[in-house]
Amino acid sequence: MRRLIELAAKKRRRVVGLMSGTSVDGIDAVVVELTGSGVDTRQEILAFDTVALPDGLRHEVFSLFDAGASLDALCRANVAMGEAFAEAALVIIKQAGLQPAEIDLVGSHGQTVRHLPADGATLQIGEPAIIAARTGVVTVADFRPADMAVGGQGAPLVPLVDAWLFTHPTEDRLLLNIGGIANVTVLSAGPSAGLAFDLGPGNMLADAAVAHFSGGRERFDRDGERAGRGWIDEGLLAELLQHAFLHREPPKSTGREQFGGEMLAEILARGQWDEDDLVATLTAFTVRSIAEGVTRFCPAGCAGLWVAGGGVHNPRMMAGLQQALPGLAIASLAELGVDPDAREALTFAVLANETLMGQPGNVPAATGARRPAVLGKIALP
């Protein structure tokens, strides 16, 4: 307790944030210097990088998405991912020109292997005790269950940090993340955190199709080249857009269970597909589901939509969004001064800081929780 009290008393804290998303394409790692907490939080990113996962470990994690995965495999992967997160933390600390002893806190989201909000259940692996032991730094992890324990869906957890870092005093804004899953945060003018929810598939389905067709040699549609060569199957697209999740009112969250490998397998089983045509259609599904969700559930009159996550690097996807949402100015989060790939790792660094200070990190309006909750569990080295 003495160590936590001493950390909480500091005016500035150097925090590592770690995030591995539903695409399992690497660990996003950031070192950020945080001043204050809550609405007074100020941040300066000192270093950011995405640390690749070894192919063997990535395959091990993907095997856990199958219904028949064993408990032994789950236990081993939890330990292996803990080692991988610890290594990513040490890598980014070194890139920042620092030593582990100069870091005050680590915030690790972990790797989601199941997210079942309807059942009040979620599971993120990447053992935080290992991260704390390898780095020698107090580690906060496993953020979602505390929100679910008070009736929330455990996601999205970005809106509070979005509100503190990106709210404008006079204009309403939308922040969109296109990772494996797409989600949006509505930032009304002023300091209060508001609506946020998952929209549906981000890059997940198109990535899975590219990996399938390339035999695993490619993991994503680089620069949207495949989608650009293909033709959209309007019949399949119309059918996909009828998915029940897309029409459900927020609060809502989703994951690989609804828009992952099983969904792709069902599509592939219908017959022979031209590779590029299917990638184009799945990319259009992402664009249209985002656009329809924004139009249906977000307030009109926002000044613009700023994009983070892997989708921001797909010109086909970004152009499609601008075409589908002509009334919104669409730009990279970089225009607000933050690397669009660093946003989620930064989020969990800030949420770890809130946990240290004993402050809630969820937004009940976004997750559906009955009340605010202090998130995460603390592992001491």
Image (cartoon, rainbow, N blue to C red):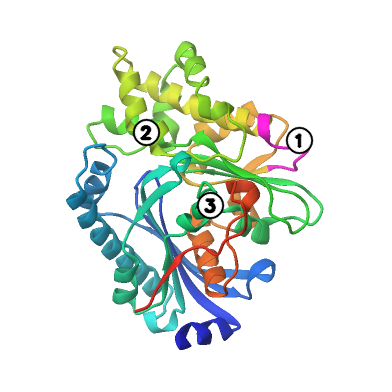
SS for callout 3: loop
- Count of number-bearing discs: 3
What residue would you read off at disc 1? 300
Q: Is residue 98 visible?
A: yes
In percent of the image, x 75 and y 41: which residue is there? 302
- Where residue 51 appears, x then y in whole percent? 34, 58
Residue 277 percent location from the top left of the image: 39, 18
Give the CA separation, mark 1 to mark 2: 31 Å
Check if mark 1's residue and mark 2's residue have beta carbons within 8 Å. Answer: no
Q: What's the residue type where badge 2 is placed?
A: Gly
Q: Amino acid at mark 3?
A: Pro
Say which label, 2 or 3, has the lower sequence index.
2
- Numbered label attached to residue 340: 3
Q: Name the mark nearer the viewer: 2 or 3.
A: 2
- Tell me, yes or no, whether the highlighted magenta stretch contains residue 297: yes
The relative height of residue 298 versus residue 54 in the rendered view (above or below) is: above
Magenta region: which residues?
296-304
Residue that appears at 69% across and 39% down:
329
Residue 250 position by quadrant: top right
Which of the two labelled residues, at mark 1 and mark 2, occupies the earlier sequence position?
Answer: 2
In the rendering, which numbered label is found on residue 260? 2
Secondary structure at numbered mark 2: loop
Residue in front for this viewpoint, 368 or 136:
368
Foreground label between 3 and 1: 1
